[in-house]
Image (tube, rainbow, N blue to C red):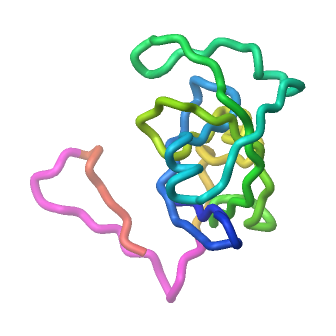
Amino acid sequence: MITVAGANNEAFEVKAILDTGTGPDWISQWYLTDVLNLKASKDKNNKYSDKNFSDFQGKPFKASGTVELMISSDEFEGVSFRNQCFLVSRKSTFKILIGKTTIKKEKLLAHKPREILGDAAHIGLQPKLSKSKLWLCF
């Protein structure tokens, strides 16, 4: 989950898709305008402005603009707030998609040690489960 600042700095929590198949971060046009009440800019100097992309079904498309958003997540290292540039997608099935550039920079798919609250961590075993279905209870 990430939190995105919309118009008048109103906060919106949204599930972002982590996609290692694309470099840049994306936001859907409808989510940007209808939910966040913000507008994209037509940035012709953006390095992605003339690049062709493919959607999840393989159909080609281009970014319709860019927008800089204030986002926050507990998964970010250090300060949890970031000003992040997003490409805008006119026809998309997602709200926000985080690309591999941000995934690597923020180490979002890296294993991070969890802080254990309390005196101990308890390992739980359920009868008749395979070894791959062990779980930890914190």
- Name the one closer to the observer, 7 or 56: 7
- Name the one closer to the observer, 27 or 33: 33
Residue 64 at x, y percent in the picture: 65, 28
Q: Who's the residue at 74% across and 37% down the image? A: 66
Residue 39 at x, y percent in the picture: 68, 48
Residue 133 at x, y percent in the picture: 26, 50
- Name the one closer to the observer, 23 or 61: 61
Q: Who's the residue at 57% across and 32% down the image? A: 89
Where residue 135 sits, quadrant-wise, is bottom left
Position above or below: 68 against 46: below
User: Majority secondary structure of the magenta segment?
Assistant: loop
Q: Who's the residue at 62% across and 45% down the image? A: 110
| Identity of the residue furthest to the bottom in this view | 118
State the extent of the magenta-drawn residues as a range.
115-130
Where residue 74 sits, quadrant-wise, is bottom right
Q: Who's the residue at 59% across and 73% down the image? A: 115
Where residue 22 sits, quadrant-wise, is top right
Viewport quadrant of the C terminus = bottom left
Position above or below: 24 against 108: above
Residue 95 at x, y percent in the picture: 49, 46
Position above or below: 13 against 47: below
Q: In the image, 47: left or right of 36?
A: right
- Residue 126 inside the magenta-drawn segment: yes
Q: In the image, 88: left or right of 18?
A: right
| Identity of the residue furthest to the left in this view | 128
- Tally the marks: 0
